[in-house]
Amino acid sequence: MALAPVRPLTAFSAQTPAQDASVQRLADDLFVLRIPGEASVVANISADGVVLVDGASAAGSDALMKAVGSVSGGRPVQTIFNTHWHPEQVGSNELLGKAGKPIVAHENTRLWLNADVTWPWSGKRFKRLPKVAQPNKTFYTTGQLPSGVRYGYIPDAAHTDGDLYVQFPKQNVLAVGDVISADGWPVVDYTTGGWIGGIVGALQRLQTMVDADTRIVPARGPVIGVAELKTQLQMYATIYDRLTQLLNKGRGPGEAVAAKPTKEFDAQMGNPDEFVRRAFESLWGYLSPDA
Ligand SMILES: [Zn+2]
């Protein structure tokens, strides 16, 4: 990346402003906002204000709020959902929490945001959020906003153990966070509960919630439909099968990678090694005899 030499060095810290958003219109009142390098955000505009599904990272929050202002005609954010606890989702929480807005999440997401988390496979550390930035309206099963927007827990632990969906029935749109990746292999965050069996379970569950016209918005990649959902379900079910067979034969993660359990999908999905390793390790917590 080329740096513009006229700007002071401090401008190139972690707070480097994100570039402008691209906006995909799903309906007159429903948009997908994409800030380069950030997870996608869904914005639902009404007379009362804006409902957001996820809020970008802290570094992307300013650019996101600018984009929200431009699609909403300056209406304020009224409610934000956190589809799960990852930093790419919760970077606007502090701003909105300080403004007294509802931050809706599954209770498990709040618990993770109230704890320091370390990923054992990379050593990456995540500091707990200040109280004001933590979800302040948590739930366990399902809920509904006065506008008719529905939300619910995805209890399969596909990506984390706090995943939620947000359903816009009028527009037939389903926002699913990182439970579906439409941009290559997903992160299987088993530290906070996610596992490959949960991906299969969640995709089966989501399949019962959509019809031929439903548009599904993942946090990464393009908007997809039921055909892509079915293709992904078949793929992950196949991989899950192969990985459990390897586990039952007493194989380890390195052997699982070497066995190429994703081989027919790699041309489309990209290098699978990191995914296969995480997916295999995720089985330990759920399927190992002494777990
Ligand atoms: Zn995530």
Image (cartoon, helix red, strand yellow):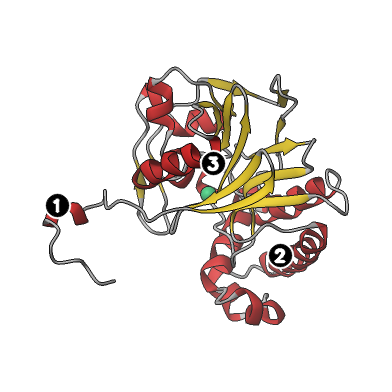
| Residue 177 in the figure: left or right of residue 215 | left
- For the residue pair 67 and 13, the one nearer the viewer reads as 67
**Dot 1: within a 10 Å radius of its alpha carbon, few (fewer than 14), some, or many (20 or more) residues?**
few
Residue 142 placement: quadrant: top right
Q: Amino acid at mark 2?
A: Asn
Label disc, if present, on residue 71 of the rendered structure: 3
Mark 2 secondary-structure assignment: helix
| Residue 75 in the figure: left or right of residue 200 | left
Q: Judge whether 259 appears above or below 247 on screen.
A: below
| Residue 233 in the figure: left or right of residue 255 | right
User: Is residue 150 among what the camera can see?
Assistant: yes
Which residue occupies 44% across, 32% down? 113
Q: Judge whether 281 appears above or below 171 on screen.
A: below
Sooner in the amino-acid sequence: mark 2 or mark 3:
3
Mark 3 secondary-structure assignment: helix
**Which label sits in the foreground, 2 or 1?**
1
Residue 275 in the image: state x and y as whole percent: 56, 66
- Screen quadrant of the N terminus: bottom left
Mark 1 secondary-structure assignment: helix
Q: Amino acid at mark 3?
A: Val
Q: Amino acid at mark 1?
A: Thr
Label disc, if present, on residue 248 of the rendered structure: 2
- For the residue pair 96 and 164, the one nearer the viewer reads as 96
